[in-house]
Image (cartoon, helix red, strand yellow):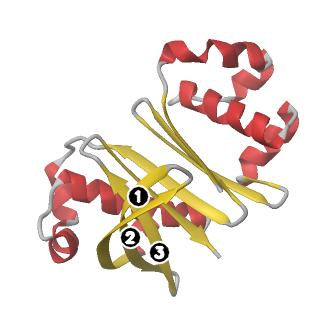
């Protein structure tokens, strides 16, 4: 298993512009073009892929027996590669519409004791990681995911620190999600085994 958590500036992708053909670069769509270029460079180098194989891998989020999942927020890229079906999600922590926070207030209050944006993003990234690992195409399914418990649990996975373990249920399955938040960003990872 490997994780890549990178802050990417728009100026840092010059190498990627030279690595890929112009026809491949045209297949990448906004938003998050710099992050998508870096993700594709990592996948190309990791799997030793041609551009056409890379496009196929991106469609299915897998290459042979390896799976990958990516998330982008702000200047950040989170990419996970695993032998197991994987879901990752990343969000830069920032205030949004208060009605959104109010939607999660009861669930956050029960498990986090207070509804704030840090806890919201910790929960939201956990739920979105599950949607990605389960191949759910419908973001509305996020409301079908229930949080059962949250505990502090420091764990290092491939040099990335996770400081929470959340237990959630979705599609009659219990999911363990490893999550992290540091007042700037929140990210989560889960596996489908």
The residue carrying mark 3 is: 176
Label 1 sits on a secondary structure element that is strand
**Is there CB contact under 8 Å for labels 3 and 2?**
yes
The mark nearer the N terminus, 1 or 3, is 1
**Is there CB contact under 8 Å for labels 2 and 1?**
yes
Distance from label 2 to label 1 (Cα)? 8 Å
Q: Quadrant of the C terminus?
A: bottom right
Labelled disc at residue 162: 1
Does 136 appear above or below 171? above
Q: Is residue 138 visible?
A: no
Count neighbours of disc 2 (C-alpha within 10 A) and say few if under 14, some if 14 to 19, many if 20 or more: many
- For marks 1 and 3, give the one nearer the viewer: 1
Q: Nearer the viewer, residue 113 or 106?
A: 113
Quadrant of the rendered structure where residue 119 is?
A: bottom left
Q: Which percent across, then down, holds residue 74?
A: 39, 32
Q: Which residue: 48% across, 50% down? A: 160
Q: Which percent across, then down, holds residue 192?
A: 61, 72
Quadrant of the rendered structure where residue 39 is?
A: top right
The residue carrying mark 2 is: 165
């Amino acid at each position: 298993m490997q994780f890549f958590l990178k802050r990417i500036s728009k100026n840092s992708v010059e190498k990627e512009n030279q690595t890929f053909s112009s026809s491949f670069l045209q297949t990448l769509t906004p938003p998050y073009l710099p992050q998508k270029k870096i993700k594709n460079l990592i996948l190309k180098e990791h799997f030793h892929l041609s551009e056409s194989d890379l496009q196929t891998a991106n469609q299915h989020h897998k290459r042979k027996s390896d799976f990958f999942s990516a998330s982008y927020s702000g200047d950040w890229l989170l990419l996970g590669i695993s032998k197991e079906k994987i879901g990752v999600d990343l969000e830069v922590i920032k205030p949004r519409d208060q009605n959104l926070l109010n939607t999660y207030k009861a669930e956050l209050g029960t498990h986090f004791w207070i509804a704030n944006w840090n806890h919201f993003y910790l929960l939201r990234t956990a739920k979105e990681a599950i949607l990605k690992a389960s191949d759910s195409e419908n973001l509305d399914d996020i409301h079908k995911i229930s949080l059962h418990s949250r505990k502090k649990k420091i764990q290092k996975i491939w040099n990335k620190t996770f400081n929470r373990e959340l237990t959630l249920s979705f599609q009659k399955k219990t999911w363990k999600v490893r999550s992290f938040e540091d007042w700037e960003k929140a990210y989560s990872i889960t596996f489908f085994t």
